[in-house]
Amino acid sequence: MLYAQTTPADKRAGFRERLGGGELLRFPGAFNPLSARLIERKGFDGVYISGAVLSADLGLPDIGLTTLTEVAGRAKQIARMTELPAIVDADTGFGEPMNVARTVQEMEDAGLAGLHIEDQVNPKRCGHLDGKQVVDEHTALQRIRAAVDARRDPNFLIMARTDIAAVDGLDAAIDRAKALVDAGADAIFPEAMRSLEEFAAMRAAVDVPLLANMTEFGKSELFTVQQLADVGMNLVIWPVSLLRLAMGAAERGLDELTDAGALTDLLPQMQHRADLYELIDYEGYNHFDTSIFNFTVAR
């Protein structure tokens, strides 16, 4: 009922322990708080909160238009709804190194288990689009050092994302990843790896946990969990998948209304009212007020 019973500190500690255990943790992307609860119910290891999804939810492109306040607020709503750890896409940190420092503390206060900061220039763009630009190494390292210095909970994960592979190639990405680890990054997110061999090369180059991004319609082939585990990945995200599935279903539903005038034929594809009420724990609220859940939902 209401929000998660596990404290943010306990979520972070548990996440760090599992991340150090060598298994591959699966973090589907939640597009709202309710989907985060569904991710938990389906047995996944954590929740990912995508900057692209938060932008799209506002009807905006993923080019750095969202603010720290908007992202931290939505991330808090999502993270508090699940017992799972949640990590958030913090873009370039929302400004200069001092802004990066504030970003870390705001995300700590919002209950997140960690975040990642990338090395793109502003305005940034989706990591799987052409024409990206990255900052120089000094600026990239400044961002990570600022994030590490600002952290108050040592279990809060500071992940560095690098987009340089698409600009200067895999060797440049490996060199930057090593420098980011030296600057204090707890984990590395090498964006837009094109093959398992590239993931394996990154794994051989650094000793910290690595994240694989399995976003659809991008530069990377959609590898299986087992394939990624076999090359030593520690985290895998599907950042926009649930939003894409939901919006695809919504579009088909609107088309059906236009064509048929009713949604009767799509009822089997919908989440049943009873399943929704179970997911939001409608009955649990009777602990406080027995007049709340005093009905039966027919299936």
Image (cartoon, rainbow, N blue to C red):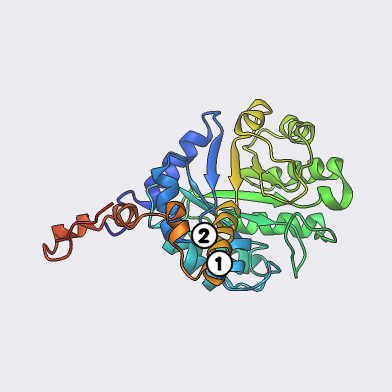
In percent of width and height, residue 171 lies at 86, 40
- The front one of 25 and 262 is 262
Q: Quadrant of residue 249?
A: bottom right
Q: Secondary structure beneath disc 1?
A: helix
Label 2 environment density (alpha carbons within 10 Å; few <14, some 14–19, many ≥20): many
In percent of width and height, residue 150 lies at 55, 59
Name the residue located 27 percent from the left edge and 55 percent from the top edge.
Answer: 281
Instruction: Reply above or below: 223 against 286.
Output: above
Say whether residue 239 is left or right of residue 125.
Answer: left
Say whether residue 199 is left or right of residue 277.
Answer: right
Q: Name the amino acid, label 2.
A: Phe
The answer to whether residue 90 of the structure is visible from this angle is: no
Residue ID for mark 1: 102
Label 1 environment density (alpha carbons within 10 Å; few <14, some 14–19, many ≥20): some
Which numbered circle lies on residue 31?
2
Q: Name the amino acid, label 1.
A: Arg
Say whether residue 192 is left or right of residue 22.
Answer: right
Q: Secondary structure beneath disc 2?
A: loop
In percent of width and height, residue 192 lies at 76, 47
Q: Earlier in the sequence, mark 2 or mark 1?
A: 2
Closer to viewer: mark 2 or mark 1: 2
- The front one of 1 and 242 is 242
The answer to whether residue 173 of the structure is visible from this angle is: yes
Name the residue located 62 percent from the left edge and 49 percent from the top edge.
Answer: 159
- The front one of 222 and 193 is 222
Instruction: Reply above or below: 104 against 162.
Output: below
Q: The N terminus appears in which quarter of the rendering?
A: bottom left
- The front one of 103 and 221 is 221
